[in-house]
Every structure is written in structure tokens, then in C-alpha cells.
Image (cartoon, rainbow, N blue to C red):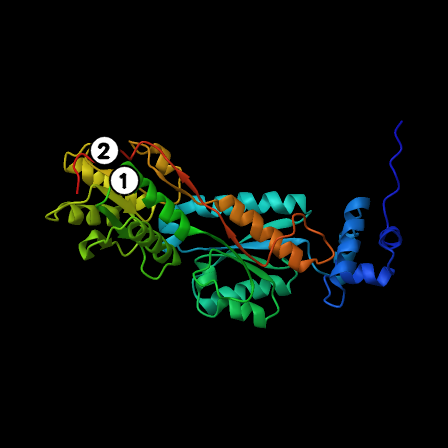
Amino acid sequence: MSIKPPRASIHDVAALAKVSIKTVSRVLRQEAKVSPATRAAVEAAVREMGYQPDLSARSLKSNVPNTIGLVRSIESDASVYQRAGHEYVMCLQVGAMRATRQLDFGLLLVPVKMQTSDAIQEMRDRFDRRQVAGYLVPAPVCDLPGLLDGLTQAGIPYAAINPNRLDIEGHWVAAAEQTSAEALVTHLIAVGHKHIAFIRGAPQSRASAQREAGWRDALRKAGIEPAADWMEDAGDFTFDAGRRCAHALFAREQPPSAIFASSDNIAAGVMNAAHERGMSLPEDLSVVGFDDLDLARKLWPNLTTVHIPFESLGEMAARQLVSHIQPLRLVEPKPGSQVMLHCDLVTRGSVARPKRAF
């Protein structure tokens, strides 16, 4: 019969790091009054001994629940839901649950209205009733005017996911969409395309702005100056908007050889419009999207797009929030307070060399 080694105590950590127990407690609480060398020595001792504070006991003493909330809008017309639908929330939830399981936390889905006062009231009520210790707040809810400031003023911990503004002071995690859009358009240029149109989604969305900026960056670096009529404003991220914009681009005196749609749903509308015109894809037109929804693999031809790591966004945000709520817990790897995640280019069958040179 194997005998389990005794569990390491805070006294053991202090002895190994050659510091006082009070200093170990300060490091675990992430207090500022500790020198970098001492902090490194204590954290190394914690890792070496596999020390884990009794966080469940601490939770009982402080009456802080071991549950965080994942907020979602109950309204389906918000731009992010037009882009990614239920996949968006489901993927965030899967990633967040992966983190919370590892960290012995629970996850509660919290639906709110898309009005700042109503959303803050709902979130505050649950926080005050000790149902949750903090919130994961994805777009579009985190973009409600004054919402994050309201949570800060109420003393409610949060981690924002893909906010429109990245100059907020709190915790956030976001996708690096501009560089990914640039890589996508650079791929089209490498295949031989020069006349690459862009369909922009919701004008107030960071996603639209970042993807447009990436499109312009790639063209500029290739020495290509886009004409004003190379871009269409969809106004949202829907299939119907993509179809309408595609027909407008096809009616140009010189139609594009490739179209960069700012979402997979818009790209699906573009492909539908192309089929209505009797065009062959990708021979007559190359089409690319953004998001890498399940839809992208069901379109024919399969859609070349950019994969946004929604699950990783949810997982990282959950780690940020738990680390903030319970500083005693040494989350490994320790997340930063503001994190940008890489997006991957996914090449499929919707891109080919153009038939004609421009």
C-alpha cells in the first residue's frame, strides 16, 4: 500500500524560501510590498513543494463563492451574434469551463438585457446574493456605455472578452484581428489577386475596424492602392447584407477578382450572389471570410477564413478572473491583465488564381 507524502504547509514554503510566514502570505496575496527577488524565491518554493492554499476554507471565511458568471445578451440582434450566433457563447463557455474545472470553480450563465442600467442591476443582484464572485463579460455586453465603469465602482471583479475599446483599465482578453486580416489578404495577393474588394460589417464594431485596417495594410505593403469603390458597407454581419453588397460589387465597371467578407455569414451571402450570377467559385471569384464558424466548412467550396480562438478567449478570461478574485491561488501559467490572442489563417477551397490580370 502506497503512503501519500504529507501535504506541504505554508511553514514548509517559508522554510525553503528562507523567509517569514507573513512574507509568504504577502506573495500569495500578490501584495506590492515584496521585492522581486523575494517574490521569485517564494513562488519557486511553492512550485517545488506543490503547495496549494486551502482556498475552500478561505472562501467560507470570507463568504466569497467559488463561482464566476458568464454574461450573455438575451437579444440576438447584437453584431457579434449576427457574426457567430450561438457558437460564440458556446465556445466561450466551453473554454471557461475548461479553466474553472481545473481551478475548482463553478461557472454560471447569466443572461442580461442590452441596457446598461438593467445589466448592471442584474449583475449586482447576483453578486450581492453571493451567487458569483465576479463576471466574464464578453462583447457586446462589455461595450454597453458605462457598464465596465459601473462594475468597477460597485467593486465587482470582471474580465472583458473582445471589447471594442482596449484602453480600459481592467482585465481583458481579445483576438488580434488586424494582423490576422492582413495575413488573409496577403494570402490572396500571393495567389495573384490585386483587385480585392472588402465588405465591412457593423460600422461601430472593433471587428469591422480591425479587419478593414488589416485589408488596407496588406494592400499598401504590396504597393496596391484601393479605389473608393473597392469597399462596400454592409451595416451588419448578416447573410443578406453580404448578398446585397456582392451584387453591388458585381455591377461595377471592373468587378473584383476576390472579395474579403468581414464575417463568414457575409461570405456565405457573397457566394450565394455569385451562384445567382452563374459564376463558378473559385474560378471566377475568390471569397474569404472571418471567424471560422462551422458554416465555413459547410459552404461549397469550403471557405478560406481566419479562425478566432473563441474557446481560448473564454479560458484565458476565466484564468484572469480567478487569479484576480483569489490571489492566493497561483494560476499557472499566470495570465496577464490584458492579453491579445493570435488568430490562425485557415486555407480551404474558396481561393484560386484569378483568370485575368488587373
Q: Which residue is drawn at 77% across and 57% down?
A: 58
Using the image, tell me which numbered label, if any, was put on residue 287. Answer: 1
The one of 310 and 257 positioned closer to us in this rendering: 257
Binning the other alpha carbons within 10 Å of mark 2 as few (below 14), some (14 to 19) or many (20 upward) gives: some
Q: Quadrant of residue 264?
A: top left
The one of 312 and 333 positioned closer to us in this rendering: 333
Disc 2: which residue: 281
Q: Is residue 92 left or right of residue 318?
A: left
Earlier residue among tags 1 and 2: 2
Looking at the rendered image, the quarter that the C terminus falls into is: top left
Q: Residue 317 in the image: state x and y as whole percent.
A: 56, 53
The one of 128 and 15 positioned closer to us in this rendering: 15
Binning the other alpha carbons within 10 Å of mark 1 as few (below 14), some (14 to 19) or many (20 upward) gives: many
| Amino acid type of the residue that numbered disc 1 sits on in the rendered structure | Val
Q: Say which element carries label 1.
A: strand
* Farthest residue, direction bottom: 153
In whole angstroms, how far apart are the C-alphas of marks 1 and 2? 8 Å
Q: Can you see residue 76?
A: no
Q: Can you see residue 168?
A: yes
Q: Residue at x 57, y 69 (%)?
A: 152
Using the image, tell me which numbered label, if any, was put on residue 201. Answer: none
Q: Residue 170 in the image: state x and y as whole percent.
A: 56, 64
Q: Determine whether 132 is above or below 218 in the image.
A: below
Q: Residue 315 in the image: state x and y as whole percent.
A: 57, 47
Looking at the rendered image, the quarter that the N terminus falls into is: top right
Q: Determine whether 120 is above or below 179 in the image.
A: below
| Amino acid type of the residue that numbered disc 2 sits on in the rendered structure | Leu
* Farthest residue, direction left: 253
C-beta proximity under 8 Å, tags 1 and 2: yes
